[in-house]
Amino acid sequence: MISSSRVRALPNSIYVVETSAGSVLVNSPPECLKFLLAEGIAIPHIVLLPPDVPAGKQMGSTGFVRVGINYASVEFLLYANFFTANRTRTRLITSTNGQAARLRSLLKETVTGPTEPELFADYPWLPRECEAVGMFPPLGRPPDADDLAEVVSLESGGGELGGGARVRLENDQFVFEENGAPVAAVPTAITGVPTPLTLAPPLPLLQQDITLQFIGGSDGFDPAGITTCFLAYFGGAGNNKPTLFDTAAYLRLRLGNLGISPRQISEVVLSHLHEDHLGGLPELVLMGEQRVRLLTSDIIYASLLRVLSAMLAVTEEEAAQLFDFYPLNPGRPLELDGRKFEAIYATHTLPTIAVRVHGLCYSGDMRYDEAWFKKLEADGVITPERRSQLIHFADDAVALVQDVGGGAVHTSLTAETLSALAAKTQHLVLAHTSKHALPADRPDLADKIHFANSGGVMGMGDSTPTALVDSARVETLSACPLFARLPIEDRIALANRAVLTNWEAGQVIVREGDPSDGQTYIVHSGLVEIQGRDNSVLVIARGTSVGERGALQGGARSGTMIARSAVQLLGLTADVFRPVAIRMGLQSAFSRADWLWHNPTFGHLAWSTMLDLALDFEPVHLKAGQRLFAFDDAGDECYLLVSGRVELKAGNEESIGELMTVGEFFGGRAALFGTKRNASAYATEPSEVWALSQTSLQRLQVVYPNLVLHLRAIELARMGQGPVISVGAPPDLGG
């Protein structure tokens, strides 16, 4: 940095730069507003967003997203400036015109919602109802994205800040100038492990017919709280996988701190697309080591694809391939794994579903006000039937999780409304609020109403049999992709012989350079930080394994492991692990895993992930002149160049290029996009490549969807369809 006095650094690569034009916020990860409020920093009116990372350059980076975290999470900054600073319009600056266009598209969907008439063919009244909820009297209409923000780009002169101040992009820095002289610079790279301000404390789960585990129960403006997001276990915690309702930001860390692997989640119910409910979804679908089953309505899904497309800089078709969509539309119940999901549209500023399943009702963000419903009916905004639907949807629910965020777009904490809601259900749980005080004149409500607290656990209904102790250990082994390859009987046998150890927060578990104790460890609960030799930091949670090599080969530990919270580890001694490892072929996979670990194509993945991938790669040895694949063949494999040279030839056998860079990925177009080979490949000298079959790619699509997106990005860059920042596209070396 040129001047540290002008720059204030906050966690998660957030910077606040003081200029003659005012404060400039550089980078806006989820909950950025909370970080600013926690530090007592006035909300900047200018926000500078990071450039796109070139396709395929950095694992976990695409569009505005870095390692699953969206660094253009600006929605609540806009609300804060507009509604609390006399309708101040926030200036959003991107690097390129392409980014600016994507950001405008994103904000249109998350602020205003979709507007295409064809989407609302079955619900023509819904836009009118959303408009009534979002009505802002000073404007005479709901505010739209253009009211809240001006989106400009450096490419089109948006770096002129006023008052003689300007900002420009120079290599890997944003350089700030005043009157032509540089005064400060901040890096464009996003570094470090993205970490939230708060994590919910883990509490024991209850074994009842419905068990709710709250990741958070607050709103987007509360620095001390986590936005509303919870897990629901039906039929007893530990007996099945929970359903996740909405997705709080920094979700993997927050789940990990509760001792939950994303691979344990059955499905995700997405109520709507406001940032405080959507923030963790990109991370979950990209980095969650599982393929997400997503339940929402057709209208919300169509809007979501546009949001993800803009956020990730991919097509809507590519975004759709990242998860499995299950339509949950009002009036059309969804049967899934023996559970019946029902939905209605809630009263909110953009399409939002309230959901009912197995006696649980979740309102989503809903303004519930029966007197207001009556007025809407009188004004012709809603029909009597719609009014009745809103009033009776939660009737006789075992539990109702209700939004009480207050204001014009949420339910207010009035005695009348709370009495009406409490009468519908056995257990009324108030969420989406930092205000945990009931009306003073109604002490009788205290026995009927609960507030959702971060980490809180609630059980309702009959008690269910306690699960066997070893079942939790089997779940942990099953959450680890490496051990998930084993038959269930082998996982059970390993779970029965695993040794459980406990570690306190801050305790060093193993230290780099220490001799291996011969055990393989799998994180059972809590968060573990791994510090590598290159000063890299990785945070792992339930279902991640370490120490496989030491168990089989001995040697020194290659990194330092520190408990970031209270941690439980499952340990497998060498005599337990070795027979299983031999059957899996791990011994021969170590060298391939080492090679992958140092390959930039697969950077930023945990060692256990590399080892898992190494089992899928098949070495292929080629003689000089030997053909690897032919033009117009069906492409069922892709490759990494390990040694030697490979020449690519067009259909007429003219040379179109030669691969000679160790680690280069090629031949992926046909396998990834389902096309025929557009080139032939020949070894020009003795060479070795590693092949990844289409079957393995299909597995990766489920287990590591982000990796497949990464490989696709590499191919798209070769096809001239890469990111909007040009880094010099490589030649078309397809296949």
Image (cartoon, grey):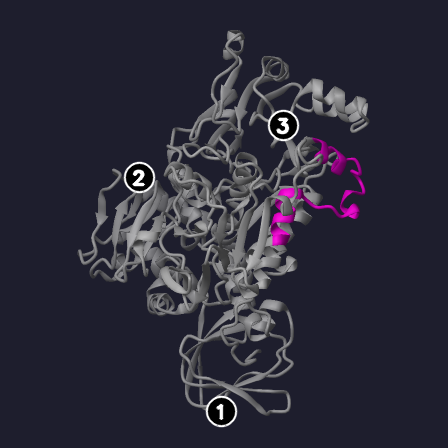
Closer to the eye: label 3 or 2: 3
Q: Nearer the N terminus, badge 1 or badge 3?
A: 3
- Residue tagged by mark 3? 408
The amino acid marked with disc number 2 is Ser
Drawn side of residue 698 relative to residue 17, left or right: right
Of all residues, the one furthest to the left in this rendering is 514
Q: Residues within 10 Å of mark 2 (few under 14, many from 20)?
A: many
Q: Main secondary structure of the magenta part?
A: helix
Above or below, comparing residue 22 to residue 189 in the picture? above
Closer to the eye: label 1 or 3: 3
Magenta-tinted stretch = 104-132
Q: Residue 637: x, y in percent?
A: 54, 72
Instruction: State the SS at label 3.
Output: loop
Q: Quarter of the image holding residue 1?
A: bottom left
Any magenta on residue 504? no
Above or below, comparing residue 631 to residue 222 in the picture? below
Q: CA distance from mark 1 to mark 3?
A: 72 Å
Q: Is residue 601 visible?
A: yes
Instruction: State the SS at label 2.
Output: loop
Drawn side of residue 202 relative to residue 734, left or right: left
Q: Residue 276: x, y in percent?
A: 53, 39
- Residue tagged by mark 1? 625
- Residue tagged by mark 2? 565
Q: Mark 1 and 2 residues: CB-CB less than 8 Å, in contact?
A: no
